[in-house]
Image: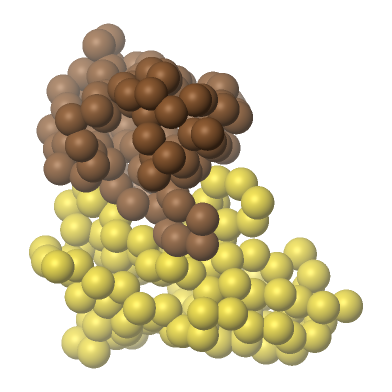
Chain colours: A yellow, B brown
């Protein structure tokens, strides 16, 4: 059975802190690893990683994938209150995405 | 351009009623997906269409759930004889096929179904 484990399940930080969100996965026919951000609405796409070791960056967010260890991390530097959301790690096999429960990040002013 | 839209945004149904949830994908997106998201959980896959063909319905929880996409665009998820355990947010997503961003799915706002 496909499995995604994210840690921590929740995290509270202050503005300006740096956070690291972890994701381990086991899926059949793995193709890519996606990260989504979900506020009180639909998930919005952040990153897609298909190769190990290549760090993807978008502003203050960055992510890296380790296909050997079946692991990914999402880093957020200089956090802002607008970063408060659930971050979902999503391994994809062919068309099917397997969502974890997510990490609930709360950034306090 | 317009994103994925879903209607209604909220639906309250009495146990035993039938409901129909609508999804309008992004124009030109060939693939369409339905997910069910229970409170505090990540979305769970229900079914997948490529154009009008339903290629995978393995996630539908029971034969009370039925999805269609007759013209390869708008899709409807129908739930017959609703039960309380059907209460959840139903998310629709669409994506292009055969591009570098094949697995990038764009989600609609969801329909929150409450069965009383």
For the point 28% across and 17% down, the residue is B69
Residue B113 in view (yes/no): no
Which quadrant of the view contains residue B60? Answer: top left
Q: Quadrant of the N terminus of chain A?
A: bottom left
Residue A19 pos. (x, y %)? 62, 86
Q: Quadrant of the C terminus of chain A?
A: bottom right
- Does residue B65 appear left or right of residue B58 in this picture? right
Which quadrant of the view contains residue B71? Answer: top left
Residue B10 in view (yes/no): yes
Residue A51 pos. (x, y %)? 27, 74
For the point 43% across and 28% down, the residue is B15
For the point 56% across and 60% down, the residue is A37
Residue A8 pos. (x, y %)? 51, 85
Q: Total label count?
A: 0
In depth, the one of A54 and B83 nearer the eye is B83
Residue at the extreme top: B71
A45 lies above or below A107: above
Residue A12 pos. (x, y %)? 70, 83
- Does residue B55 appear left or right of residue B7 in this picture? left
In depth, the one of B45 and A77 nearer the eye is B45
Which quadrant of the view contains residue B19? Answer: top left
For the point 38% across and 67% down, the residue is A100
């Amino acid at each position: 059975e496909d499995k995604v484990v994210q840690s921590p399940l929740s995290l509270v930080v202050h503005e300006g802190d740096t956070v690291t969100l972890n994701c381990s996965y086991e899926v059949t026919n793995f193709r890519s690893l996606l990260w989504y951000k979900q506020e009180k609405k639909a998930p919005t796409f952040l990153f897609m990683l298909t190769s190990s070791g290549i760090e993807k960056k978008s502003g203050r967010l960055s992510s890296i994938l380790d296909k050997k260890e079946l692991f990914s991390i999402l880093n957020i530097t200089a956090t802002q209150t607008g970063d408060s959301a659930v971050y979902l790690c999503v391994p994809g096999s062919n068309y099917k995405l397997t969502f974890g429960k997510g990490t609930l990040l709360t950034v306090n002013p | 351009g317009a994103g994925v839209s879903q209607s209604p945004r909220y639906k309250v149904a009495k146990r035993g009623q039938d409901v129909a949830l609508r999804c309008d994908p992004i124009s030109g997106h060939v693939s369409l997906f339905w997910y069910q998201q229970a409170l505090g959980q990540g979305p769970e896959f229900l079914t997948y269409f490529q154009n009008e063909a339903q290629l995978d319905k393995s996630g539908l929880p029971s034969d009370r759930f039925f999805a269609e996409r007759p013209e390869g665009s708008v899709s409807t998820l129908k739930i017959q004889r609703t039960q309380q355990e059907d209460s959840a947010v139903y998310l629709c997503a669409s994506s292009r096929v055969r591009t570098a961003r094949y697995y990038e799915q764009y989600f609609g706002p969801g329909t929150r179904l409450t069965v009383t």
